[in-house]
Image (tube, rainbow, N blue to C red):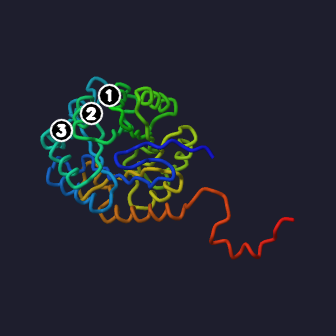
Amino acid sequence: MTERRTVPFGPYTLGDAQPVCIVAELGVNHLGDYDRMIDMIDAAIDSGADALKFQTYTAEKRYDRGTNPKADQFIANLARWEFTRDQEARLWEHAQGRGAVVFTSPFDAESAVFADEMGSVAYKLAAFEVVNLELVRALSQFGKPVVVSRGMTSLAELDTCVDVIESSGADPVLLHCISSYPVDRENSNLRMIHTLRERYDVPVGHSDHTRGCDIPPLAVAAGANMIEKHFTVNPKLRESDNPFSITPEELREICFRVRQAESFLGDPGVERLETEEYMWTFRRHSA
């Protein structure tokens, strides 16, 4: 069996035979409320997340008014939820002061530089940005892993993105993702994880937009090396991703189920196990 590539990710290693990395995606579920973001950071850490993911952006640079007819609406929302760089720096320092592993989705080159200064262990490329090769190059230049959400992309587009990352000297990590918010469980299409594993010799994970805890352990059984779930402390909030995000209790449940799934998967080698030794004495033996 060919050994697949592993990728350093802060204090962790991503890849087969490594513990699955469970990421709490905090994103903009804080809705611009600094104290709520502090609560989200603390709750995600206390609930067992291996890593936290932020979003780092300047609202005016997120959408092109010349090509996107809804740009004004999107920019207005994001501007309401945008922290100042000073606030962001204090949030990073709070999370890291508690021992958290933090990375982020930067949406422009200046935000990527800021995140690098803050100690981001990797960069997340949102599915909406996979064809934004200028941003792909900006994220890859730091030599840190670039975690790519595959949602809505063709394999040809993903090939190009991966080539840009690798030619810049960085390691890609690919996340199977269905870009719907939320995703119905029957549309999870976890077999795509197999497709990505067969096509690319890099760690593959799953960014899950379904409600609840059912899909992550199934994704692990399908070969996921990383699980990302949107996280909130108040699912009753109706804006951003809060309505379908997991709560602290659900994050603890997912951590338990993922570790259980890893234990059940065991070792891939085909050989007689110790637990089979007794029944071996009854087996017909070859001449």
Q: Is residue 113 left or right of residue 268?
A: left
**Among numbered discs 3 and 1, the one appearing first in the sequence:** 3
Amino acid found under the numbered disc labelled 2: Ala
**Amino acid bearing label 3:** Ala
Q: Secondary structure at mark 2?
A: helix
Q: Which mark is residue 138?
A: 1
Relative to 109, does residue 14 appear above or below in the rendering? below
Left or right: 149, with 35 as reference point: right
| Amino acid at pointer 1 | Ala
Inter-mark Cα distance, 3 to 1:
23 Å
Return the x and y of residue 271 as percentages of the image width and height. 67, 61
Q: Is residue 63 left or right of residue 144?
A: left
Whether the residues at callouts 3 and 1 have beta carbons within 8 Å, the answer is no
Q: Residue at x 54, y 53 (%)?
A: 222
Residue bearing the label numbered 2: 112
Tag of residue 215: none
Q: Residues within 10 Å of mark 2 (few under 14, many from 20)?
A: many
Question: Where residue 184 sits: x, y (%)?
Answer: 44, 54
Q: Which residue is mark 3?
A: 79
Check disc 3: other Cα within 10 Å, few if <14, some if 14-19, many if 20+.
Answer: some
Residues at marks 3 and 2, CA–CA distance in whole angstroms: 18 Å
Q: Are marks 1 and 2 in contact (CB under 8 Å)?
A: yes
- Write the residue at 32% across / 61% down: 48
**From mark 1 to mark 2, how far is it between C-alphas?**
7 Å
**Residue 92 percent coordinates (x, y):** 20, 46
